Image: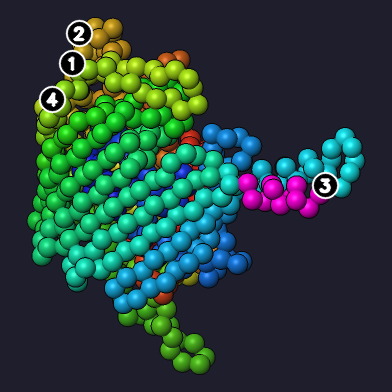
C-alpha cells in the first residue's frame, strides 16, 4: 500500500524527507503543507549506517550525490564517504566527509591556462586543494542507554557556510508507545514548493501510539520554534506560518483500514524450485512485493492545534544572500482543528522473483489534506469567483492524487516514478497539473528481506542522491 500514515505524520515537525542538502541526508517536511511524496520520505536507516553498507559496493567507498548550492562555483555534484566508524556493543561513532570537485578542477585549470603560459607553482595547486569551501564534515554518535532507550548526537559543518548544524535526539520505546525528543540548532525544513528554510532553534517532544489491530492510532506533541525562519533558496520570502516563532501543542488521531479485492498467496512451490542439482530456495527480491493483488485502503483522522504565542505579529524572513530582510504579515490562528483523509487503490502484477516481467505495480491515492479548507473553497466558489480565487491561494484546499508506478527492469532492478497531481488550476492553466515528480532506480537486496539501494532524482528540487532504504513498500 502507499504509505497512508503520511497523512498524520505530516502534521507534526519530525517527518523526514530525503535531501542531500545535509550530511544527515534528510530535512524536515513543513507541517501544514500538502502531504509529501512517498518516494521523498527519508530512509529509516541513519545516513552513517547507509554509507557504511553502501561503501562496500562503490569504488573506495565513495558515494555520489547531487544538490545545488548558493555558491555556483562549487557546482552541484559532490562525493561522500564514511571516514571513521568505531563501535562497541552499545555505542558507535561515525565521521562523514564530503567533497565538491568542480571548483578545484576549475581553479587548477585556470592556473594552467593563464595568460603568462607558466606552469603553476606547487604551492598554488596545494592552496586550491586545501580550500575549505570544497569540504564538509559531519560527526554523529549514538549511545544505547537501555534496551528501550537511546540518545543520538550529531554536528556538521559546511566549508562554504558559516556556523554548524547541531542535533540531539532521545528515543524511548514503551510497550504500546514511542516517545521522541528532538532538538536542532538550526533545523532545515523543506516545503511543498521545494524551498528550504532554516529555523534557528527547533525542539519537539512527541508521543505516538503503535498502530492497533483495529487500525486506530493517535499522537500528541509539543513543539517550540525560536528565531525567525531564514530562506535558504526561497525566492518570494514567504515563510510558512508553522515555522514562525512560538510554542505549539498538537494532538491527532487516525483510523485506517485495508481490504483485499483479490490476492494470490505465496505457496511453497513459489519459494522452492527444482533444478538439475536439486531443490533451491528462491524467495522474492522483496518480501513486501511477493504477492500479486488488488486492494483498497483508506485513512481518516483529525487534529487540533494550539499556539501559545501570538502569531499575528509581522515576522521577519531573512533572505540569505540579500542585504535586506523581507517581512511577512501572515496570520496564524491560536487554535485550530481539522480533519484529513486518504483513499488508496493498489494493483500489483507479478511476484518479483523472475528476471523479467515479474513486477508491475500501480498505486493511486487521493489525499484530502484539510477538510475545512476544502469546504471553505467549495462554499466560496458557490458565492463568487473572487472569493474562490482567494481560497484557491490556500494549498491545503485542493485535493491531490499521488500516483506511484513501479516496473521491473531486470532481476532486482526496478524503475519507479512518484508524482503528485493537484486537482486545481494555476494562473494561465486550467485543470489538474503535476505539482511534484520524483523518479528512481532501485536494486533490491534479498539478504535484507525488504531492503534496497535507491538512486533518485527530483526535477523540482534539482537534486538527487543514493540511499539504502529498509522495509519500504
Assess disc 3: are there few (<14), some (14-19) or many (≥20) residues with their C-alpha within 10 Å of its C-alpha.
some
Asked whether the residues under the numbered discs 2 and 1 touch, taking CB atoms below 8 Å apart as contact, a structural biologist would say yes
Q: How far apart are marks 1 and 3 (CA)?
A: 71 Å
Judging depth in this view, the residue of 215 and 217 nearest the camera is 217
Q: Which of marks 2 and 4 is nearer the N terminus?
A: 4
138 on left or right of 368: right
| Secondary structure category for the residue under label 2 | helix
Q: What stretch is highlighted in magenta?
A: 120-131
Q: Which mark is residue 383?
A: 2
Residue positioned 23% across, 57% down in the render: 170
**What residue did someone put label 1 on?**
379
Residue 366, percent across and down? Answer: 28, 38
Q: Which of marks 2 and 4 is in front?
A: 4
Quadrant placement of the C terminus:
bottom left
Q: Which of marks 4 and 1 is in front?
A: 4
Q: Distance between the residues labelled 4 and 1?
A: 24 Å
| Secondary structure category for the residue under label 4 | loop
Number of numbered tags placed on the structure image: 4
Residue 38, percent across and down? Answer: 35, 47
Q: Is residue 188 visible?
A: yes
Q: Which of marks 2 and 3 is in front?
A: 3
Q: How far apart are marks 2 and 1 (CA)?
A: 7 Å
Q: Which mark is residue 334?
A: 4
Residue 367, percent across and down? Answer: 27, 37
Q: Does the magenta stretch include residue 35?
A: no
| Secondary structure category for the residue under label 1 | helix
Q: How far apart are marks 2 and 4 (CA)?
A: 28 Å
Residue positioned 42% across, 58% down in the render: 139
Q: Distance between the residues labelled 2 and 3?
A: 73 Å
Q: Residue 120 carries which label?
A: 3
Q: Is residue 289 visible?
A: no
Amino acid at each position: 500500500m502507499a504509505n497512508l500514515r503520511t497523512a498524520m505524520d505530516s502534521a507534526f515537525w519530525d517527518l523526514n524527507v530525503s535531501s542531500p542538502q545535509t550530511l544527515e541526508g534528510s530535512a524536515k517536511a513543513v507541517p501544514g503543507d500538502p502531504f509529501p511524496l512517498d518516494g521523498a520520505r527519508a530512509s529509516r536507516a541513519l545516513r552513517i549506517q547507509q554509507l557504511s553498507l553502501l561503501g562496500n559496493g562503490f569504488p573506495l567507498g565513495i558515494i555520489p550525490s547531487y544538490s545545488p548550492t548558493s555558491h555556483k562555483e562549487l557546482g552541484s555534484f559532490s562525493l561522500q564517504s564514511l571516514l571513521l566508524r568505531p563501535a562497541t556493543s552499545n555505542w558507535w561513532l561515525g565521521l562523514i566527509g564530503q567533497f565538491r570537485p568542480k571548483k578545484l578542477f576549475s581553479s587548477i585549470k585556470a592556473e594552467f591556462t593563464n595568460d603568462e603560459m607558466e606552469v603553476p607553482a606547487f604551492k598554488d595547486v596545494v592552496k586550491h586543494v586545501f580550500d575549505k569551501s570544497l569540504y564538509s564534515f559531519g560527526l554523529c554518535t549514538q549511545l544505547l542507554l537501555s534496551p528501550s532507550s537511546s540518545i543520538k548526537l550529531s554536528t556538521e559543518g559546511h566549508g562554504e557556510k558559516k556556523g554548524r548544524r547541531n542535533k540531539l535526539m532521545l528515543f524511548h520505546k514503551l510497550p504500546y508507545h514511542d516517545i521522541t525528543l528532538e532538538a536542532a540548532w538550526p533545523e532545515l525544513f523543506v516545503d511543498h514548493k521545494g524551498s528550504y528554510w532554516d529555523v534557528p532553534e527547533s525542539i519537539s517532544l512527541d508521543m505516538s501510539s503503535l498502530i492497533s489491530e483495529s487500525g486506530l492510532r493517535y499522537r500528541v506533541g509539543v513543539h517550540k520554534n525560536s528565531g525567525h525562519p531564514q530562506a535558504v533558496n526561497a525566492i518570494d520570502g514567504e515563510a510558512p506560518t508553522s515555522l514562525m516563532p512560538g510554542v505549539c501543542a498538537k494532538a491527532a488521531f487516525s483510523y485506517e483500514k485495508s481490504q483485499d479485492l483479490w490476492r494470490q498467496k505465496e505457496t511453497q512451490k513459489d519459494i522452492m524450485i527444482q533444478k538439475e542439482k536439486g531443490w533451491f530456495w528462491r524467495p522474492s527480491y522483496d518480501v513486501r512485493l511477493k504477492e500479486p493483488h488488488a486492494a483498497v485502503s483508506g485513512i481518516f483522522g483529525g487534529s487540533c492545534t494550539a499556539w501559545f504565542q501570538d502569531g499575528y505579529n509581522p515576522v521577519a524572513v531573512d533572505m540569505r544572500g540579500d542585504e535586506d530582510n523581507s517581512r511577512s504579515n501572515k496570520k496564524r490562528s491560536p487554535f485550530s482543528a481539522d480533519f484529513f483523509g486518504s483513499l488508496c487503490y493498489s494493483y500489483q502484477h507479478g511476484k518479483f522473483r523472475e528476471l523479467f516481467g515479474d513486477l508491475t505495480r500501480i498505486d493511486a491515492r487521493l489525499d484530502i489534506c484539510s477538510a475545512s479548507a476544502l469546504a471553505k473553497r467549495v462554499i466560496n466558489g458557490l458565492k463568487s469567483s473572487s472569493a474562490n480565487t482567494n481560497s484557491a491561494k490556500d494549498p491545503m484546499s485542493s485535493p491531490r492524487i499521488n500516483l506511484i508506478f513501479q516496473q521491473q527492469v531486470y532481476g532486482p532492478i526496478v524503475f519507479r516514478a512518484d508524482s503528485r497531481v493537484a486537482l486545481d488550476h494555476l494562473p494561465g492553466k486550467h485543470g489538474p497539473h503535476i505539482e511534484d515528480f520524483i523518479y528512481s532506480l532501485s536494486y533490491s537486496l534479498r539478504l535484507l528481506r525488504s531492503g534496497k539501494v535507491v538512486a533518485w532524482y527530483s526535477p523540482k528540487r534539482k537534486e538527487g542522491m543514493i540511499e539504502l532504504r529498509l522495509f519500504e513498500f
